[in-house]
Amino acid sequence: MILSMMSSAEVLAITRLRQWAVDRLALRASRTTDYKRTGWQARDTRTFDARLVRVLDFERALERLPEDEQMLLVLTYRERQCHQEVSKILRCSVRKLYYTLPAARKHLAEILDRMDIL
């Protein structure tokens, strides 16, 4: 992945995708709060709700993509699979991935921008 070839919107879309993966994992593992006993602190539930809202908003945006673009982005950026593995899973050539991946990133960036979550 060459960052100089990507637009800033695409880089932000990848960042949101990776943030979604981390937040989603934390929610599934029930790691939304930190229960260290370091004295009394007022709990701010808004910070924990923000993680849930970010996950839900991103999943709504991801659902607007075609299924092949969803799988391509998730396998590449969340699961961190190499292009050869992704091409085997999606049953297409590596060459097709090299022109489909930038289009999927741009499409995701457009959707996130329209939803004001980029």
Image (spheres, rainbow, N blue to C red):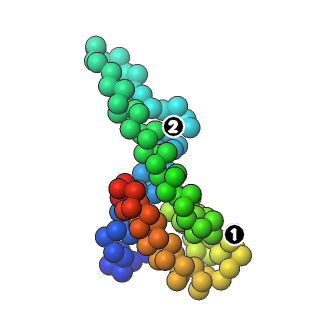
Could you tell me which residue is drawn at 71 percent across and 76 percent down? 91
- Where residue 27 appears, as percent x and y from the top left, is 51, 37
Q: Residues within 10 Å of mark 1 (few under 14, many from 20)?
A: few
**Amino acid of disc 2:** Leu
Q: Which residue is mark 2?
A: 27
Q: Is 43 or 109 nearer to us in this picture?
A: 109
Could you tell me which residue is drawn at 52 percent across and 52 percent down? 60
Q: Label 1's element?
A: helix
Q: Earlier in the sequence, mark 1 or mark 2?
A: 2
- Where residue 85 appears, as percent x and y from the top left, is 64, 71
Q: Which residue is mark 1?
A: 89
Compared across the picture, whether 22 is left or right of 9 comes to right
Q: Is residue 77 above or below residue 28?
A: below
Could you tell me which residue is drawn at 42 percent across and 28 percent down? 33
Could you tell me which residue is drawn at 52 percent across and 51 percent down? 59
Q: Label 2's element?
A: helix
Q: Is residue 5 above or below residue 115?
A: below
Q: Is residue 41 above or below residue 15?
A: above
Looking at the rendered image, the quarter that the C terminus falls into is bottom left
